[in-house]
Image: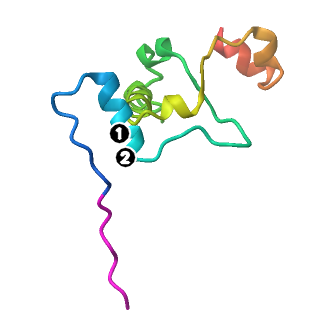
Amino acid sequence: MPRIREYHPRSVTTAGLDIPTAITATKIVNSIERPKGYTVSYHANPEVEDHHFGANHPMKPWRLTLTNKLVMAYGMHDAMDMYISRAATEQELRSFHTDKYVKELQ
């Protein structure tokens, strides 16, 4: 049976570089470029990162913060259309959720 190969990502030394230059170098090393023939979009809202959904909820604010930092650090933001999400209107919520659930949110 073949041995499992360890993953060793290509690295780039970014010490001493300013942040934009370091991100550009990382994008080149990791071959990050905008896809051709289709678009990729990334939706985020920094305000949600400060919201705690409760101890038993799977969505933790630090997960959102980590995702955003990784997207930016790897330069992936240049390969996607970036959007800041807005709060849904009550009508939009009702088109997806039951009236009972929307009332519980209020």
Find out whether residue 5 is within the magenta segment: yes
Which residue in the protein does label 1 denote?
26
* Amino acid on which the number 1 mark rests in the picture: Thr
Looking at the image, which residue is at 44% across and 33% down? 71
Is 11 placed above or below 49 here? below
Which residue in the protein does label 2 denote?
29
Looking at the image, which residue is at 79% across and 24% down? 98
Secondary structure found at label 2: helix
Q: Is 95 left, or right, of 73 in this rendering?
A: right
Q: Position of residue 83 (x, y in %)?
A: 61, 19
Q: Are marks 2 and 1 in contact (CB under 8 Å)?
A: yes
Find out whether residue 4 is within the magenta segment: yes
Q: Position of residue 49 (x, y in %)?
A: 44, 19
- Quadrant of the rendered structure where residue 36 is? top right
Q: Where does the C terminus fall, quadrant-wise? A: top right
Which residue range is magenta in the image?
Answer: 1-8
Is 56 placed above or below 104 here? below
Q: Position of residue 1 (x, y in %)?
A: 38, 91
- Quadrant of the rendered structure where residue 39 is? top right
Q: Is the residue marked by circle 2 packed among few (<14), some (14-19), or many (20+) residues within 10 Å?
A: some
* Amino acid on which the number 2 mark rests in the picture: Val
Cα gap from disc 2 to disc 1, whole angstroms? 5 Å
Main SS category, magenta section: loop
User: 76 or 85, which is in the foreground?
Assistant: 76
User: 40 or 19, which is in the foreground?
Assistant: 19
Secondary structure found at label 1: helix
